Amino acid sequence: MSSQPEMTFVDHLHELRKRIMRAVIVLVLTMVVGLILAKPIITYLKGVEPASQINWNVFSPWDSLRIYMNVSFLFAFLVSLPYLLIELWGFTKPALKKHEQSATIGYIPAAVLLGLVGLAFAYFIVFPMAFYFSTTVTDSLDLTETYGISQYFSFMFNILIPITLLFELPIVILFLTKIRILNPFLLKRFRRLAYLIMVVTGALITPPDMISAVVVSLPLILLYELSVWISRRVYRKLEEQDREREKAAEEMDESQ
């Protein structure tokens, strides 16, 4: 374990409170920036496909304020995410060995990068497919499209947020393998169930046609396989370290 002195339960609570307070302060400060930038962000999103041809409406006095605040918070969360992850790492650091501390800090840029890739995939590929499919259904039923801004952005966020989180799967698997909660054998054992969850997820957040479901499900399945591969490599390294420690302990016993 780490060479730092062992912390009591009260010390852990005090440390957790300090880190939560710092994280909240950073989130609030970035939220202030988000409140300033929310209007140009919303204006930009309204001006690009598939939203550029929509006549916008509100159906409640709260709709405009709700969207303004949601966009501000989402901006604040994305910008402050690296710092939030650093605080999370700092809280778990005392429970990690010295070499694990240096290894896990590298998870943060990887998590941010995967989140951005997932967000781009969701916004530029999945969301337009879902939107154009719903528009096609509307036209086929001879209905008039009257979009409320709250409903449109809720529809978009309901697609973007789950996919972005799913793209963090390799980092989560890597961390859980590192702390020996998961291993590649367990991941292989539940592979069929994981595939089913990925396919169902892809079907739920895309139009109900085979091509769209495959376009979304396939990257998610590849992410799971990447996670299994990463877990296997990490697990082998952990086994090698265990064997080296056992060998060193045996040699020490023989020398005594």
Image: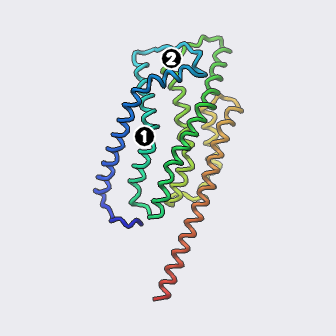
- Numbered disc 2: secondary structure: strand
Question: Could you tell me residue 234's position as x and y percent?
Answer: 57, 60
Q: Residues within 10 Å of mark 2 (few under 14, many from 20)?
A: some
Q: Which residue is mark 1?
A: 80
At x 63% / y 34%, what residue is drawn? 203
- The CA distance from mark 2 to mark 1 is 29 Å
Q: Considering depth in this image, is 36 or 2 the residue closer to the camera?
A: 36
- Say above or below: 35 vs 201: above
Q: Quadrant of the N terminus?
A: bottom left
Amino acid, disc 1: Ser
At x 63% / y 55%, what residue is drawn? 229
Left or right of 43, for residue 11: left
Q: Residues within 10 Å of mark 1 (few under 14, many from 20)?
A: some
- The numbered disc on residue 179 is none
At x 57% / y 20%, what residue is drawn? 51
- Numbered disc 1: secondary structure: helix
Quarter of the view holding residue 8: bottom left
Q: Quadrant of the C terminus?
A: bottom left
- Say above or below: 67 vs 219: above
Question: Could you tell me residue 35's position as x and y percent?
Answer: 39, 27
Q: Considering depth in this image, is 22 or 144 the residue closer to the camera?
A: 22
Question: Could you tell me residue 143's position as x and y percent?
Answer: 62, 11
Amino acid, disc 2: Gly
Left or right of 160, for residue 85: left
Quarter of the view holding residue 114: top right
Q: Considering only order in the chain, which callout, 1 or 2, is on the residue closer to the N terminus?
A: 1
Question: Could you tell me residue 254's position as x and y percent?
Answer: 50, 87
Color scheme of the displayed model: rainbow
Contact between marks 2 and 1 (CB within 8 A): the answer is: no
- The numbered disc on residue 148 is 2
Left or right of 79, for residue 216: right
Residue farthest toward the right in the current orientation of the protein: 211
